[in-house]
Image (cartoon, rainbow, N blue to C red):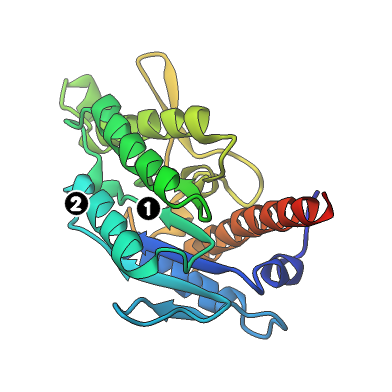
Amino acid sequence: MSFTLDADLAALANCRIFFGHQSVGSNILAGLADLQKGSAHPVAILEHRAGTRPPQACLLHATVGRNEQPLTKCEEFRRIIDEDLAGLIDVALLKFCYIDINEHTDVDALFAQYTSAMDDLARRHPGTAFVHVTAPLRHTPGGLGVLARERLGRPNRVKLANMKRNRFNDLMRRARASTGVFDLAAIQSLHADGRRESFRKDGATYQSLVGAYTDDGGHLNAAGRLVAAREMVRCLAGVARERQAAAAGAAGR
């Protein structure tokens, strides 16, 4: 079922959300601020401060860990929830950055470590729904010059890194479909007319960031951040509705 933006924002009216991120996450939050201007049900976007109790409805956020070291992001996300937010939030999500996954990343090992960290948090915080986020992509330039360099045997590092991100995202979609996925990569690669931005390599097709959504090849511009923010709201509203339905069912038994 499809809901309007106002209906999705209203579904978050009593929801406390924590979002761990870095720069692309900041882009998405800026998009959310733009998106909900004039809405009757705006979400309060607040920076997390240790020792401060979150209000009944809000989207708390914090920059976590260090770029290019994704496991530090898992660790700081865990620490904040354990030490500051235990029992105080309804939904939590952690987003890696595109720079955390490059052409040399052992994606299967990274995903296993991410899964272990998130599963451990879910076991110890059963009152919190953990939403999983696909890794953001970079734009993959094309054209005759790029093709010529590839035919000369020069590695296209943007493509190679995006291939690794696609692998991570495929693992995420398969493993976490039943527990909630904010598919950032899928919305980043979808044109307004429904076409998919992609490239082919070694007989396979890989998603790539739409060029119109970025000014530097990776971060989201005004158009890209609106698209990403709308998808995040849609995803979180769906999780909130599921929690509300489960609570109502439990109360009726």
208 to the left or right of 247: left
Instruction: Between residue 198 and residue 177, name the one nearer to us.
Output: 177
Instruction: Between residue 56 and residue 186, name the one nearer to us.
Output: 56
- In the rendered structure, find residue 159 and report the number of the disc placed on it: none
What residue did someone put label 1 on? 95
Looking at the rendered structure, the secondary structure element under dot 2 is: helix
Image x and y of residue 132, in percent: 46, 45
Three-letter amino acid code of the residue under disc 1: Lys
Image x and y of residue 206, in percent: 43, 29
The quadrant in which residue 9 appears is: bottom right
The quadrant in which residue 195 appears is: top right
Instruction: Between residue 19 and residue 205, name the one nearer to us.
Output: 19
What residue did someone put label 2 on? 72
Instruction: Specify the farthest residue to the front.
Output: 253
Q: Residue at x 70, y 65 (%)?
A: 8
Looking at the rendered structure, the secondary structure element under dot 1 is: loop
Three-letter amino acid code of the residue under disc 2: Thr
Q: Is residue 150 above or below residue 136?
A: above
57 to the left or right of 28: right
Q: Is residue 142 above or below residue 48?
A: above
Q: Is residue 219 above or below residue 46?
A: above
The quadrant in which residue 152 appears is: top left
Q: CA distance from mark 1 to mark 2?
A: 12 Å
- Is residue 5 something one can see in this rendering? yes
Crowd class of label 1 (few under 14; some 14 to 19; many from 20; radius 10 Å): many
Image x and y of residue 201, in percent: 36, 21
Please tell me which of labels 1 and 2 falls first in the chain: 2
Crowd class of label 2 (few under 14; some 14 to 19; many from 20; radius 10 Å): some
Instruction: Between residue 238 and residue 223, name the one nearer to us.
Output: 238
Q: Residue at x 41, y 14 (%)?
A: 203
Image x and y of residue 93, in percent: 44, 55
